[in-house]
Amino acid sequence: MEKIEKTDMIEKKDKFTIGNLDLYYGDFHALKGINLNIRPNEITAFIGPSGCGKSTLLKSLNRMNDLVEGCRITGQVLLDGEDIYGDMNVNLLRKRVGMVFQKPNPFPMSIYDNIAFGPRTHGITNKAKLDEIVENSLRSAAIWDELKDRLKKSALGLSGGQQQRLCIARALAVEPEVILMDEPTSALDPISTSKIEDLAVELKDRYTIIMVTHNMQQAARISDKTAFFLLGEMVEFGETDQIFSVPKDTRTENYITGRFG
């Protein structure tokens, strides 16, 4: 009998499964019938013109839209097969699915306390354990060497690029499985942007990354899969190389070649 290698039996299951998702802000139909599977340990980019629904979808993945008055969602969003709009604890969901925003938003406290904030919220008070989490998180965000002698100083004194890497470290401190990035480099200079891109590529070995970007070159450089959105619909989704070289939909081609957007 042929011996089956164990690795052959392990199937790479989807991290997120989005089925027939519709989202309304009051009467406005912001997302229309979204069906999308997101694989683990990949970078998935959401591209499209302003107001097309990409950030709205991103925020639906950790229920940030719960905070918006008049927001209504139908359909399913499954995280590892579990409906996040079912009985799932929202705090636990946001621990598993971290968020990095467009504008760096460090808390007005020390660099150390920024990173320790999440773990403390989840009940970790041991100083040695917090020290370890702070160091590991800053190392993972490739900024430990720059900040290790400044941990007690205010995070607000850092440059924009450093603040954004600090915010990534803060997201990593609670050991998420997924990192959502909403245009994380749009407020940064080219050198800082390059550092964040390199960091995202390094992090995908351990995390699933979903990134909204206006920068098509960025999507082409670092993402494995790309979804193109237009007027609340997902027009096309596939391997990034395919989307950028041989898009199947004329609207995708028109956007990528700069005919609109």
Image (cartoon, rainbow, N blue to C red):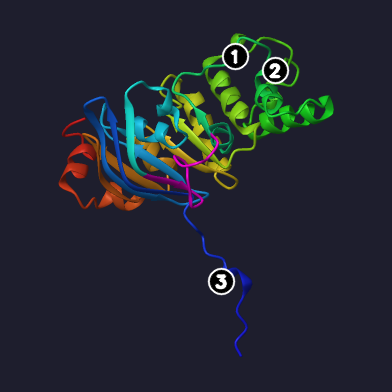
Q: Quadrant of the N terminus?
A: bottom right
Q: Which residue is mark 1?
A: 107
Q: Disc 3 versus disc 2: distance between alpha carbons?
A: 44 Å
Furthest residue in direction bottom, as rendered: 1
* Whether label 2 touches label 1, CB < 8 Å: yes
**Image: 54 above or below 75:** above
How far across and how far down the image is residue 154, in percent? 66, 9
* Amino acid type at mark 1: Phe
**Image: 33 above or below 185:** below
How far across and how far down the image is residue 253, in percent? 20, 44
* Whether label 1 touches label 3, CB < 8 Å: no
Indicate the secondary structure of the residue bearing disc 3: helix
**Image: 181 above or below 78:** above
* Amino acid type at mark 2: Asp
Residue 113 shows in the view? yes
> In terms of image quadrants, where is residue 23?
top left
How far across and how far down the image is residue 229, in percent? 27, 38
Bounds of the magenta segment: 76-89
Characterize the local packing of mark 1: few (<14), some (14-19) or many (20 or more) Cα atoms within 10 angstroms.
Answer: some
Q: Which residue is mark 3?
A: 8
* Amino acid type at mark 3: Asp
The residue sitting at 78% across, 26% down in the picture is 131
The residue sitting at 49% across, 31% down in the picture is 194
